Amino acid sequence: MSRPVQAVIDLQALRNNLQVVRRTAPASRVWSVVKANAYGHGIDRIWRALEGTDGFAMLNLEEAILLRERGWKGPILMLEGFFHADELPLFDKYRLTSSIHSNWQLKALQDARLHAPLDVYLKINSGMNRLGFLPQRVPGIWRQLRELANVGDITLMAHFANAEHPDGITDAVARIGQASEGLECPRSLANSAATLWHPEVQADWVRPGIILYGASPSGQWQDVANSGIRPVMTLTSQIIAIQTLQAGDCVGYGSRYCASQEQRIGIVACGYADGYPRLAPTGTPVMVDGIRTGTVGAISMDMLTVDLTPCPHAGIGTPVELWGNEVKIDEVASAAGTVGYELMCALAPRVPVVTV
Ligand SMILES: *Cc1c(COP(=O)(O)O)cnc(C)c1O
């Protein structure tokens, strides 16, 4: 028997979540966002469950090439485009749609020798101020792109900074309107939050990421609890030792938790080197044998400790769910001051993964 920590990836949940996106945005095509190795789920492991998508969006060339080598023939959108002009022959060879967010990319595209024109996504800076052209420059850039023999279809793209708030996209929508005035071309604007909560901007292509994996773009599970999406990743382990603390006994590094009366605690084979957040405080929810309890004391590299008061029958080998269908990854993340995105992306390579 090996160390019991394990991540289970539920491909049926992934298919279900794509269907939820389809129902939510019935008039839009769907870029399934699989950047960061499919948000930590493993792109090679999961992409076939998303085969019903219209396209895959990502940003690593290696991941895009992998999809092509595995047989995906549909569109692939590189969300940040090429990082250097010398990648253009590969964009050409593998037929990758490129975001164009900066002048130098325009120039590089103009100078490239390609076998066929590349489709591009012209990125509008709608207020996030990371990538893209200011609205007043977009029509001019669009016309320049239109002139280039190396450019095929042009789609306008923007990305919202605050789509999880009810009034969070108003300014951005005004800037997008300014940028696209008079331009006849498709648009792709909506991440998960906008797809769910601002249907008026679903436009031609939506770009959901986090909801495909069954977590909330707002960080709060209750915001998506009625949407029909289901968690894809479950992190499980087992109890490997039991301690009975007496009043005043403390547990773990820094003695950050001390018992006020006799208390049974379970030692679980999972720690921050597996991707569990070190900053999770005492009381972070965890399921032990189907019963909800909480962590006690510091999270160590390879272990964490849980209160067994509500689970008197728990013993060595009792199964523990760190996050998944019962304890939502958003709950653990918010207890630790982060978001589900970070936890799923941080699943450590040492954790064995099985798909079901
Ligand atoms: C990551 C990303 C998305 C997906 O965002 P979610 O919040 O995970 O839905 C969409 N568009 C762009 C440009 C992105 O970088």
Image (cartoon, rainbow, N blue to C red):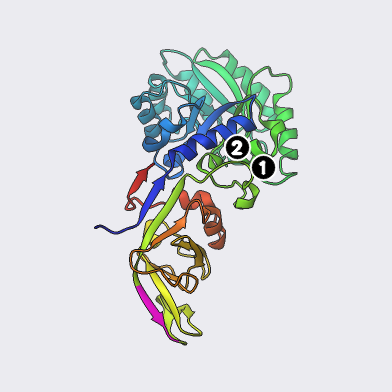
Mark 1, residue position: 163
Residue 124 numbered mark, or none: none
Amino acid type indicated by mark 2 = Asn
- Measured as percent of width and height from the top left, residue 292 is found at 51, 63
- Measured as percent of width and height from the top left, residue 127 is found at 67, 40
Is residue 309 visible to the viewer in this orientation of the structure? yes
Magenta stretch bounds: 242-246
> Which residue is at the far front?
313
Q: Is residue 348 rendered to the left or right of residue 310?
A: left
Mark 2 within 8 Å of ligand 1, using the beta carbon: yes
Mark 2, residue position: 191
> Which residue is at the far left?
1
**Vertically, is 253 above or below 180?**
below
Image quarter hosting the C terminus? top left
- Measured as percent of width and height from the top left, residue 325 is found at 50, 51
Is residue 189 visible to the viewer in this orientation of the structure? no
Q: Is residue 222 rendered to the left or right of residue 316?
A: right
* Residue 224 shown in magenta: no
**Vertically, is 225 above or below 296?**
above
- Which quadrant does ligand 1 occupy? top right
Mark 1 within 8 Å of ligand 1, using the beta carbon: yes
